[in-house]
Structure formats: structure tokens, C-alpha cells
Image (tube, coloured by chain):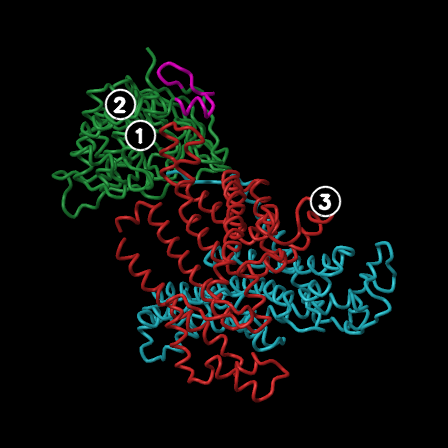
Amino acid sequence: MSALLEVDDLRVTFGSTAAVRGIALKVEKGETHCLVGESGCGKSVTSLAVMGLLAKGGKREVARLSFAGDDIRDYDEKRMSHLRGDRMAMIFQEPMTSLNPAYTVGSQMTEVLRRHRGTPRTQAVDRAVQLLTRVGITAPGLRLGQFPHQLSGGLRQRVMIAMALMCDPELLIADEPTTALDVTVQAQILRLLAELQKDLGLGILLITHDLGIVARVADRVSVMYAGEVVESAPTAELFRAPRHPYTRGLLSCVPVPGKVKRDEPLGSIPGVVPRIPPGFIGCAFKERCSYAEAACASPLPRRYIGPAHEMLCILPEGSGA
Amino acid sequence: MSTVLQPAGASSRRRIWRNAGALLGISIVGFVTFVAIFAPWLAPYDPFTIDLGRRVIPPKWMEGGTPTNILGTDQLGRDYLSRLIYGARVSMIIGVATIITSGIIGTFLGVMGGFYGGRVDDAVVFAITARLSIPVVLVALAVAGLLGTSFTLVILVLGLLLWDRFAVVARSTTMQIRNLDYVAAARCAGCSPIIVLLKEVLPNIATHLAVVATLEMALAILLEAALSFLGLGVPPPLPSWGLMISEAKEYMFFSPWIIIIPGIALFILVLGVNLLGDALRDMLGTDLSR
Amino acid sequence: MLHFLRRRLTVAILVALTVLTLSFLLTRLSGDLAISIAGPNATQEDIELIRSAYGLDRPLWVQYFDWLWRALQGDFGDSYFFKTRVSRLIMERMPITMTLGLCGLFIALCVALPLGILAAVRENTWVDRSVLMVALIGQAMPSFWLGLTLMIVLGLNLGWLPISGTGSWQHYVMPSIVLSFSAIPSLMRLTRSGMIEALASDYIRTARAKGLSRLSILVKHGFRNAAIPVVAIAAVQLGFMLGGSIVIETVFALHGVGYLAWESISKNDFPVVQAVVLVLALIYIGLTLLSDLLNAVLDPRLRSA
């Protein structure tokens, strides 16, 4: 049985800059797959490329892009627009600016249903109310008539989630949905997403830079660096036994209360994320890697370490630890 | 994050386009300035000499034209090309003199308001609002009608009326700078504010004002032409392009060239000044004057 | 918002009073009005007669307050030349000027809005550059010259339209076109930049992510936001057009308020000049208030501010 979303060898370029350099990932139905990495690693671009929402000037090449078994690789804008909002939905990082200030919450929610299903207004409104309640918004009737600027950030993000669910999508792509919110609100939103996934069987592709979020909600993790997925594994296994030097570096950067000793310097990875020139071959991480050797300058093999655990590195198993 | 990145080809195309515009603007303004300055040497004849025996002769390339007067003669037999060349003087002098006058007034008001804030600023904003409510053409005409037409009067009136954009831009840029250099000014708490203004504020707003100056110059040239056209601008026999159009109005249906030529001259000059302004604005990367 | 409007209203009234004063001073610029009215051939007696007849022998501040008091009641005095109430003269001519202004604005919007949207959607292509060039050309064109040229081409050579007067709707076509030229460049640029900004915004990305139709994204979401400043500016542009109507009206011999002002200036008919300046300024002030109101109505964010 094919996965809900399958991406293979996705490449995205903006002019001469390669933002995404051949990544592969799968999202199963009912599973949360987290794509994690630093700013600039190409994770947001990946999500936009999958949805066909790249900005002007972005070129996408992909060997395989399938959604619920259908090959959507060559879908034109028109066909994609019928998928988007209906069977695949996306929510973004900035709830403050992601809603149109000129229209009410209600009209922005109902228009999705009316566009994709032709639902008459009253029914669409009922569904909107139902969803607003589901995402934990009180007095939904009142909220429908309000404008975005009258809602707080947390509320707006809930509205975004509710809006994304209007047509009962199968896949939800969430691009850093909690980054712009307070910590307490973050927790609420994450809990909400987990509940919705359980109830609706949603497949979720969650983009984030926060390993804490990954630990909480992800079934599977893909770690991105400089446009490539350097390691991909089920969450528990990644945290238990990270193999790629970058992953290990990332995890060591996160201070764990109780484990970190006083006066001990916090972990960090020396150097900065490099800019990848076109035609680059080899490992992008080698300048910052303490295990780097000459062989790292040649094309890297994708290696399988365990079932469903793969990484992009020549390090043999058992080394480092 | 949806960044709008352009592929390399488009941005260099845009740059070429912008450079072409700037080049054209500079060439036009430069050319007209040259013509205005060297008019006595460039003009084939005296623009005021009337020759009633040779009136309304068409340009050389049209039927009835003669090689003696390349662009023909006007309704009083004066050589058209010479009048056109001297007309460049009128437009350029009025344009430059007006922006100097209105520039000084507007900049002064704007900087005062932006720098001191509070009641001073309220007064400046009020003055700007009041000035914007006044129908400029009408008032300029009325003043000319009452006081009689003269070259200096046109400059004075336009200068006293066209300072609003200078004030707006000077005010907003001064406010930005005041916030930035507030620390410096505070440290300078021994320096008189005038020194601070002259040394800190003015140099920083100069380029923005230059952009406004080009826009206002274009406007001044067009306004002078309109005033002269209505007979209340530059007095005859001075060769203002607007006045030339007005004087030749009666003949326009039979000899359309007689009004088309000065109109084209006006159009090209104003276009050049606007292109220059656009080029300056691109260099700055700001768009405060709109 | 009510507080904001109240403040604007106060400012507007103060500005109106200032303009009242300025227009009064305007006509007193030339020194002795009596001499100007009497004309070059008058004797000293005639001048004195005129001076007392028109109340010009009273102290200046008395004349000012008299004018102010009457103006506030809509009484602008009598025209020296037409021998009727100035207010009536203005009322008779105003419809023509208003029609001209509104037609000009209508044409300007019909041209500027679609072109601005087109330029924004096709940003940095030849379409965009052509549109910007149109704006440049419109800005550089002297209106009176354009009027005359159109007269020659459309009126005389092709005989499509009448060249002067106000007989029928055809008489308004050329003047309205010329008038619209003054507003098109700025409206077009504003629409274009507003649309570019709107289309680059996050809520447009959300609209695309929702799979909405292209038209809906462009018009319903994009233009709706970009239009807010354009509508506000359009109201102000109308004010500018009315103020500048004098040139067009004289070229095309349309007997509107502008033409009236023109006649009165040439005849030194001061009460009329004073009143026309005032009325046009008041209309402009009213339009800027309207523009603020429109802004508030169209932008929900301002309503609760």
C-alpha cells in the first residue's frame, strides 16, 4: 500500500541557489512526520514545493511526487488548486499575517467549502462552527463574525487549523505552526494537532526547528541540513541512537534539565550553515564535522542502519557514539 | 516563508531598463540645459524680430517651407526655431528658480516640524493641509491677474505655492533621523540646535529632497506653461513655450505644427526631468514622495 | 474611530477658515481695489464713488469680518460684472464642472485600475514596463496642449466630436479624457504597488494554499486590500481635478466654475474670484474627509481603532 505522501529526489532552485538538493520522504496516513533543521536548511521550501506553492522564480524538479496513490508530479496549477484546501491542506508560521484582514473569519472559512464542494452558505457556516468548537474556540458564532485583527495569535492559529480542516483533508502540512506563539499556547496547539490526528486519521508533515516539539509529537523524523535529509528514523530511535554527526551535534545542543552539569559549557556545533554553490558534490556538513575525511568530498551513499533508519554519511555503524 | 526571488536574468534586464531611463533623462535635461545656456549662440535669429511679411511659414520639410527658417515662422513672422531655443531658457530658469524658492520654504518648514515636534509640528502639518486645499492654478492666475504678469512674479507665486511636497518629505525624513541621532544630539547638549540641524539633518535628507526637486520642477514647468497659455504667466514677447501655443491658437486648425512643436518640446523636457527623478529614486531605494 | 473623525473635522474647519481668510487677502493684494474696479479711465470722483458703493472705505478688518460672516451664511455678495448673486452664479456653473470632474475620474479609474493590476501581475515583464511608460507619458503631457491636439485630431480631422461648448454628452468626451490624464499616472502607480505588495503577502499564500481560484485570489483577496488606498486617493484626485478644471474649461469653452473664475479674473470681478477659490477649497476639504471615511469603511482594522 502506498504512503499518503511520497516524495523522491526533490530539487528546488532559485536562480543559481539550490535550496533543496534531492530529498526523499514519506508520510503515512495517521502518522506525524517531522522535518527538522536549522533556518535556511530548506525545510519550508520543501513543504511549499510539495504543495506547488513556490514563489516566482522557484524551479522544482522531482523524480516522484505522489499523493494518496496518485502521481501529482505533473499536475498544473489548476489541478493542484483543486487538491489544495480540499485533500491536502497547509498551515503556516505567522498567524498574525496569514489571514486576510479585510474579511471576517467566517467568510474566509466558508469560502473553502464553497469552492471545493459547492456547499451552500448555511451548511458551510454550520461546519465552520463545528470546527471552531473542535479546535477549542469558545463562542464560535461570535468569532465567525469577527475580523482577524480582533483575535489573539493563539486564536488565529486555531482558526487557521480549523480552516485547513474544512474539507476534511487527508494530509496536513504544518510549517512551524507554533514558532510565533507563546510557550503555553504552543503546548495547546500541539496537543490539539495530536488529538485531531487521532480522531481524523490525518497524515501530518510538521516542519520545525524545535527538537522538543519533535520529541513530543513525531512518529518519524527527518533531519535536514543544507538542502538534504541527512538522517531519517522513527523518533524514539533517532533520539536513542542518532548516527549522523549533525544529528548528534543537534541533540547535544539541547540542554536537558537534570543531565546538564553546572559550569559545563552548552553543546554547540562550530561554524555556520554554508551556502551551497551549484554543482556541489559531497557532504555539506564536512567543514563542521569532527569525523570528516577525504572521502567526504565525493558523492555520499544513502545508507540503511536499521529498518526505516537511514542516513547520508560514510561513517560505519558503531563509530562515534 | 514566501520569499519573492527573481531569477538572475530578470534583475539584470530590470537594471538595463532602469539605466536606459536614467540615461535618457540625464541626456534630455542636459541637452535642454545646454540649449538654454548657449541660446544666443545656437539660435539662428533674434527671437523678437518681427517680420510681418513672412508670417506662419511652415517648417522646412513641409509644403510651403523655406530653408531660411528651419522650423518656419510664427504668426508675427518671428523665427520659430529661435523662439523655441530661447523658450528653453524660460522653462529651465523658471523650473530651477521655483524649486529653489519652494525648496527653501518647504525644507525649512518640514525640518522645523520634524525636528521640534509638538506644537511646532502641529502648526507645520496644519500649514501643509491648508496649502493642499488651495486650488493652485486658480490662485496663481488670480494673483497674476491682480498684480500684472511678469517673469519674477511667476517664479514667486509658484515658489510660494509648490513647497508642500518638500515640507512633507523633509518632515518625515527629519523625524526618522531625529530618532536615530537623538543620542548624538543629546550628547551635543552644548551645541546649538542649528548646528545639529546643519551638520546632521540636512546632509541626510538632501538626496530625498533631490528626488522631490525633480518632481516639483516638472510640475513648475507644466504650471508655467499653463499660466502662460492662459495669458497670465510670462508676459509677451518673451518666448515661453506655453505662451507660444496660446498665441498661435487661432492658426492651429490650418497649421497644426504651430502648436504641436512647442508642445512636444514641453513634453520631452518634463519627461526628461521625471526620468531623472525616477533614476534618483532608484539610486536611493526609497519612495517617500508618493 | 469617531474620535479620529471628530479630530479631522476640527482640522477641516480650521483649514476652511484659513482658506476663507486667504481668499479674502488674495483680492486685497493689488492695493486699492477701487482703482482696479474703476478702470484706467476713471476720474478721482468715480473712484471715490466706487469706494463707498462697494464698502471699500471701511477699515480692512471690518471688511474681513463682514465677508466672513456673510460667507458662513453662503452669501458671497454680488458679482461686479454679472450683476447677480455670486452664489447663484456658482450654483449655475457647478453642475458642469462636477460632471466634468466625475467623468474624468471615472475614465481615470477605468484605465488606471485594470492597467495597474495587470502591471502588478506581470511585474517586471514588458507588459509592466509598457504600463509604467504610459504613466510617464501621462505625467509629462501638458493638459492644455493635449486638449488642443485632441481637438485637431478628433474634432477637426476626424470630425468625431464637437470641439467646444456643452450641448450634449459628446461635448464632455474630449475634456474628460484630457482631465483623466492628470489622475491616471498616480492612480495606476498606486494600484500597481498596492497589488504587488498585496500579492506578496502571507494571506495570499494562504489563499493559494486553500486552493481558491485564480480570479478569487486576485480580485477578492488581492485587490480588495490594494484598493483601499486607491479609493482614498481617488477622492483626493477628484479634488485636484476640480481645482485644475480652469485650464480644460477654457480650452474647450465649457462654462463651468473654472471658466467663470477665468472670466472673473480677467474682469477683476473680485467677489467671484474670492468665492470660487473658497468653494473649490471647501470641496477639496470635503473630499479629503470623505477619503478618510472611505478608508475607515474599507479597512476593518481602522474601524475599531
Q: Label 3 to label 2, Cα distance in Å?
A: 60 Å
The chain coloured cyan in the image = B
Q: Is residue C127 visible?
A: yes
Mark 2: few/some/many CA within 10 Å (<14, 14-19, 20+):
few
Colour of chain A as rendered: green
Three-letter residue code for mark 3: Leu
Asked which quadrant contains residue A188, the reply is top left
For disc 1, the marked residue is: A35
Q: Earlier in the sequence, mark 2 or mark 1?
A: 1
Of residues B71 and B1, the one nearer the viewer is B71
Three-letter residue code for mark 2: Gln
Three-letter residue code for mark 1: Leu
For disc 2, the marked residue is: A123
The residue stretch that appears in magenta: A66-82
Mark 1: few/some/many CA within 10 Å (<14, 14-19, 20+):
many
Say left or right for A298 vs B154: left
For disc 3, the marked residue is: C158
CB of mark 1 within 8 Å of CB of mark 3? no
Q: Residue at x 26, y 41 (%)?
A: A180
Quadrant into which the N terminus of chain A falls: top left
Q: Is residue B16 visible?
A: no
**Residue sitting at the far bottom:** C44
> Subunit of mark 2?
A
